[in-house]
Image (cartoon, helix red, strand yellow):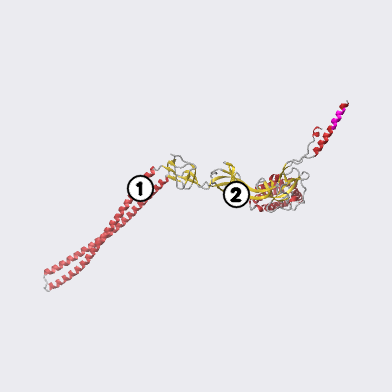
Amino acid sequence: MRRLIMLALLLLAGAGGWAYLDRSRAAQPEASWRTAKVDRGAIVAAVSATGTINPISTVIVGSQMSGLVKEILVDFNSRVKAGDVVARLDDTQVRARLEGARADLAQAQAQVAVQQAQKLKNAADAERARAQLADVEAQLKRLDLVIADAEKTFQRQSELNARGVASAVTLQQAKTALDTQRAQRASAQAQIGSAKASISALEADAKVIEAQGLAAQATAQQRGAVVKQIEVDLSNTEIRSPVDGVVVQRQIELGQTVAASLQAPTLFLIAEDLARMEIYANIDETDVGRVREGQTVSFTVNAWPARSFEGKLKLVRLGSQTVQNVVIYTAIVSVENPRLELRPGMTANLRIVTDRRENVLRAPNAALRWRPPSAQPAAPAAPANPLGGGLAGGPGGGFGPPPNPGGASGQGGQAGRAMGELAAAIRNEVKPDATQQKRIDDIFAAARTRFTQAMGEGEAAGRGARMRTIREEMSAEIEAVLNEEQKKLFAALGQRFAAQRGGAAGRAGPAQGGQPGRVFIVGADGEPQATALTLGATDGATTEILSGSLAEGQEVIVGGSGPKASTSLFGRFF
């Protein structure tokens, strides 16, 4: 019996000691914060995009002639030079046409020669006729002199016969000689008329021969043009490369019939220079304001997943396209391809470097996004603007959590979330009537549009100032809609939002070009303590710290649920 009592006392003493130790251990919380260090390093902000690799120039080689493919001299990946024959068509019919056309040309040229000979003969006949005319005219002048002498002789014989000195026979002979010379003169005049008529006829024949010669020459030229055209057709049966390059596509086979009746069929595609390529990349409208000509571009392709290639941004086209309600712009990236590893049609995953900062203080983006589930810092003094401090764009956090990866688009998303939170708080706590709510909704809609425009316009350095101006104007417009009682509630709402985003620490204002943000560190009591920062560029994993109280190597909270009391094992049983 005594032994049982002693055993019971020992058990009670052990249980009491165990309960004391268990409660002492349960009183000590177990911290479960996950932290990361603030460090120094490079920040490289970039825009991601996808695109297709293309040659700078791709030439389509076609055929102007129809015919049977008789010979193919190149294949895929064949290197060619300008003027090289890449294929031949059957030229039998073309050669037959060429022989016929050349015969017609020879006939026309012979006709031209005949007309030229006739022209020379006509010219000779005309010259002879003119000589004869000149001879007859000379004879006519001689006859005029002879007739004048005969007339004097007849006159003298008539006078002598009247005086009885000359005989009648002598008088008759003088008269006969005069009549004869006059007849010869009339004949010479007739010959002159005939010679002149012959000359006129020869001159008319010369004009006819000249016209016939011109017609013969025109016929010869026409048939010569036909010969040249057929010779061109014959040369076109040999398909030649117009440029130096590489055959990337062949779309004909030996024995295939090429029909070029309506348009030139495509036979080959030749890439002019595969050592230099271009990437046609699609840039989202939210990112197009950050890309500039000359920026460095790195990219990967699926064929070489472990390698990174580089290029330069050559051009951003002004024209846009809308694909599935998304506005995109085409950017052209120049790429050197000396070893021909990049091939036309490959998909490139691009990273366009828009900003680079070396040796800067960096905070992990996970710390900028993290928020304690129930931390409520002390409320600061009410700002003049209900949207001031954390709400109106002060460095206490802006319209929502610190910047997300992605630069301007991340800031736009942050602003949109915070605006949604603010709109819901106004609806639930300020309680505007239907008319006021409609007006407030319109103000928020207009502000969102202005925010989107501000994100894509101008330099990043002035973006924060533009956004703050928009927020202040939006705050003033909302306040103008409310009555006096609602204005007080709206001011209190602004104080609370500013406090939730570290507004007390942020009223000093951000550094030039920075955006407000906030991280949490583990305080002396084990609870998260807000620290306001001014943030710069981000690379998606870390963000540049422009100003704030953090130092290199300091731990910031990136996750966890905070200290939690251990449950007493004794309590599980009792």
**Residue 290 in sight from this viewpoint:** yes
Image side of residue 402 versus residue 13, left or right: left
Magenta stretch: residue 369 in it? Answer: no
Residue at numbered disc 1: 102
Provide residue 535's location: percent of width, then percent of height: 69, 50
**Other residues around mark 2 within 10 Å, as few (<14) / some (14–19) / many (≥20):** some
For the residue pair 488 and 103, the one nearer the viewer reads as 103
Predominant secondary structure in magenta?
A: helix
The residue tagged with tag 1: helix, strand or loop? helix
Q: Quadrant of the C terminus?
A: top right
Across and down, in percent, residue 311 comes to 58, 48
Secondary element at image label 2: strand
Stretch in magenta: 5-13
Amino acid at the residue labelled 1: Arg
Where in the figure is residue 62, as x and y percent of width and height?
Answer: 46, 45
Q: Residues within 10 Å of mark 1 (few under 14, many from 20)?
A: some
**Mark 2 = which residue?**
296
Q: Looking at the rendering, in which quadrant would you find the N terminus?
A: top right
- Residue 53 higher or lower than 512, as above or below: above
Residue 179's place in the image compared with 315, above or below, is below
Q: For the view shown, which residue lies furthest in the right direction? A: 2
Residue at x-position 29% and y-position 56%: 120
Q: Nearer the viewer, mark 2 or mark 1?
A: 2
Residue 332 in the image, given as x and y percentages of width and height? 57, 48
Residue 319 showing in the rendered view? no
